[in-house]
Amino acid sequence: MKITKTQAGQTITYVVSGRLDTVTAPDLGKEIDAVTPDIKELVLDFDGLEYISSAGIRTVLTAQKKMNKQGVLKLRHVCPAVLDVFELTGFADILTIEK
């Protein structure tokens, strides 16, 4: 998995590619843990993310919980396979998923 971080004002974007699974989810989790309270928008850009496991979903839900307290979480460029996982688990209903 590769993570690229950019920040513009109160928005942080992480572009995540590869596989978000048991091995790699802790890396993204550390990045999300480091998001400071002054950040009002967290974007997870999944352009290039080809697979997500339950550990990856847990990391996304942790990000959602964190941002519910301080702003908004948005998922962008979610491929059909990953979107199917969010829809099958019912999490597509509680996440903001943009095209």
Image (spheres, rainbow, N blue to C red):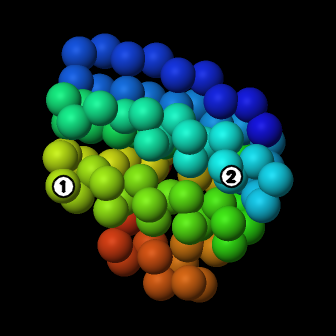
Q: Is residue 73 above or below residue 42?
A: below
Residue 50 visible somewhere in the drawing: no
Tell which of 96 and 57 is nearer to you: 57
Q: How many marks?
A: 2
Q: Earlier in the sequence, mark 2 or mark 1?
A: 2
Q: Position of residue 26 (x, y in %)?
A: 67, 49
Q: Kindly indicate the quadrant of the structure image that contains residue 92.
A: bottom left
What SS does tag 2 mark? Answer: helix
Residue depicted at 74% across the width and 31% down the height? 2
Q: Position of residue 73 (x, y in %)?
A: 33, 49
Tell which of 64 and 85 is nearer to you: 64
CB within 8 Å, label 2 to label 1: no
Residue depicted at 78% across the width and 61% down the height? 22
What amino acid is labelled 2 in the image? Ala
Q: Which label belongs to residue 9?
A: none
Q: Position of residue 33 (x, y in %)?
A: 45, 42
Please identify the quadrant where the N terminus is shown. Answer: top right
What SS does tag 1 mark? Answer: helix
The residues tagged by marks 2 and 1 sit, at their Cα atoms, a distance apart of 22 Å
Tell which of 13 and 47 is nearer to you: 13
Residue depicted at 53% across the width and 78% down the height? 87
**How crowded is the residue under tag 1: few (<14 C-alpha within 10 Å), some, or many (20+)?**
few
Q: Which label belongs to residue 25?
A: 2
Residue 20 is left or right of residue 95, and the answer is right
What amino acid is labelled 1 in the image? Lys
Q: Is residue 22 above or below residue 45?
A: below
Q: Kindly indicate the quadrant of the structure image that contains residue 10.
A: top left
**How crowded is the residue under tag 2: few (<14 C-alpha within 10 Å), some, or many (20+)?**
many
On the image, numbered disc 1 is attached to which residue?
69
Q: Position of residue 50 (x, y in %)?
A: 77, 51
Residue 79 is left or right of residue 59, and the answer is right
